[in-house]
Amino acid sequence: MKKQARSVQYTIRGVPHEVDRALRQRAAQRKQSLNQLILDELTIATTGRTKRADFSDLAGKWTPDPAFNEILASQRQINWAGWR
């Protein structure tokens, strides 16, 4: 089983109105929650890089599907008459 990363919660008080407004506006532009935007911004500010998505729980989960393979094979056919 995958080991979950531990996280900590913060409560921040005294955020100036102009900072709140700017953060909320940026979150809306990026179509993110305010919480996610702040986490992203803190990560970049402290580590210099963005957090990468973790898809390790999906790795090795592919289940062969003959019907899907047939569909892919039919899409890979070249119509030479239409290719001119």
Image: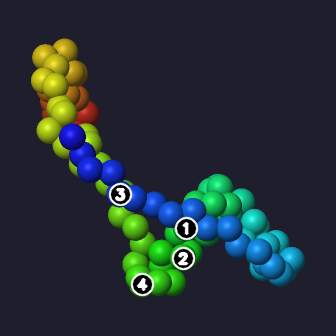
Taking the image as shown, residue 62 lies to the left or right of residue 12, namely left
> Does any portion of residue 81 appear in the rendered image?
no
Give me the C-alpha separation between circle 3 and circle 2.
17 Å
- 68 over 83 or under it: above or below: above
Question: N-terminal of the two: label 4 or label 1?
Answer: 1
Report which residue position mark 4 lands on: 48
Give the quadrant of the N terminus.
top left
Identity of the amino acid at label 4?
Gly
Query: Residue 39 shows which numbered tag?
Result: 1
Marks 2 & 4, CB-CB < 8 Å contact: no
Expressed as whole percent of the image width and height from the top left, the position of residue 9 reads 57, 62
Give me the C-alpha separation between circle 2 and circle 4.
9 Å
Marks 1 & 2, CB-CB < 8 Å contact: yes
Give the quadrant of the C terminus.
top left
* Callout in the foreground (3, 2): 3
Report which residue position mark 2 lands on: 42
Report which residue position mark 3 lands on: 5
